[in-house]
Image (spheres, rainbow, N blue to C red):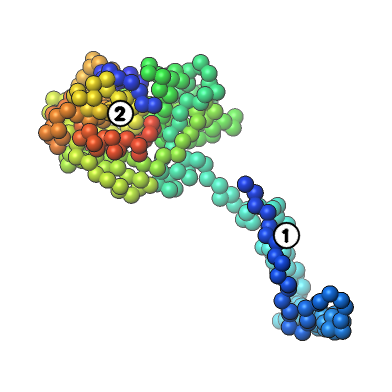
Amino acid sequence: MYPPPCGISGSPLMVVESPLMSDEKPRARRGESVPEDGPSTGKTLATAGKILLGLGLIIVIIVLLGGLRGRDGVSGHMGSGVTEAMIQSTGENSAAGEPLSTTSTSLTQLEQAEAENGYLAARASAGLGAEDIRVYDSIPPGSKLTHTFPRTGELDVVTTFLVKDEAVSDDGRRWYEVYLPVRPNGSTGWVRAEDVDTVRLDHHVRVRLEDYELDLFQNGKLVDTYPVGLGKEGTPTPGGTYYVTIKMRPSNPAGAYGQLAMGISGFSEQLPDWPGGGQVGIHGTNDESSVGSSVSHGCIRLHNEDILELNPSVPLGTPVFIER
């Protein structure tokens, strides 16, 4: 699982705050004085004023309610209904911290990521131990096993997928449809959510074959553009939707693959017997003049300084869209 791209030899990259107290004396309200150290006649007058004001408000409310109930001959049912609605809208009958709306506004992790122009990666859970990840052609019932992947690959890199969709089976389990690093390009399958750990991704890469350029996006916004070298006529770079599966530092940083290489989930359609299975890579180069032209066996070449700059923004699982 996850052999080195392009047959490269190398190593994988791998307090609660308390409420503030105030020493400031309370400000005087209209009609009352601020109490000092002992009782005063002002305090007594203020208390009497409060009582009279309260009685006056009660009388006004009674008159208004009576007018609403008798207005235009309408019975008191409307007034009762309005009162109940007002109580519900204040949240007095709601549990603390819950939304007042009866319609759930919670999003799944995939929905939340997509709502913010991001993506979701699924990585093999450590809880699997030595067990393989099982991939099925659909969610139950009637699903069939199509692939199994070890939790870690040949270079001890954690198996990672790009999530495409999600669903809940009849038994209440959540499943993810994921892109698979297998032939044919663009293959997908379903994995149980409990077998993977999901990771939110903010970046994606888009390669424009006609323009010999690679664009880096963050939350849907263009961040940077890099010139690239692409596959030549007999071994073109395959278009499609892929993702980063592995990163490596080539054993010879002055060699053809430059200082860093990334494998993606796509494969050359012309070189199935190429070392590593013909997996397409994004890598540096020792021939700077090859960037901007069609010279490779299908891999995507960048200047060494460019791929080193790109590297931190594209963790495993990052989508790579190659436009024909």
Residue at the image point whose x is 50% and y is 28% from the top = 196
**Which SS class for mark 2?**
strand
Image vertical order of residue 134 relative to residue 217, above or below: above
Left or right: where 183 falls relative to 18: left
Check the picture and name the quadrant holding the C terminus: top left
| Nearer the camera: disc 2 or disc 1 | 2
Residue at the image point whose x is 19% and y is 40% from the top = 227
- Residue 151 position, x and y percent, is 46, 20
Q: Label 2: few (<14), some or many (≥20) within 10 Å? A: many
Name which residue type carries label 1. Glu
Q: Label 1: few (<14), some or many (≥20) within 10 Å? A: few
Left or right: where 237 falls relative to 88: left
- Residue 95 position, x and y percent, is 70, 52
Name which residue type carries label 2. Met
- Residue 252 position, x and y percent, is 23, 21
**Visible in this render: residue 59?**
no
Image vertical order of residue 182 relative to residue 47, above or below: above
Image vertical order of residue 204 relative to residue 233, above or below: below
Q: Which mark is residue 262?
A: 2
Q: Which mark is residue 92?
A: 1
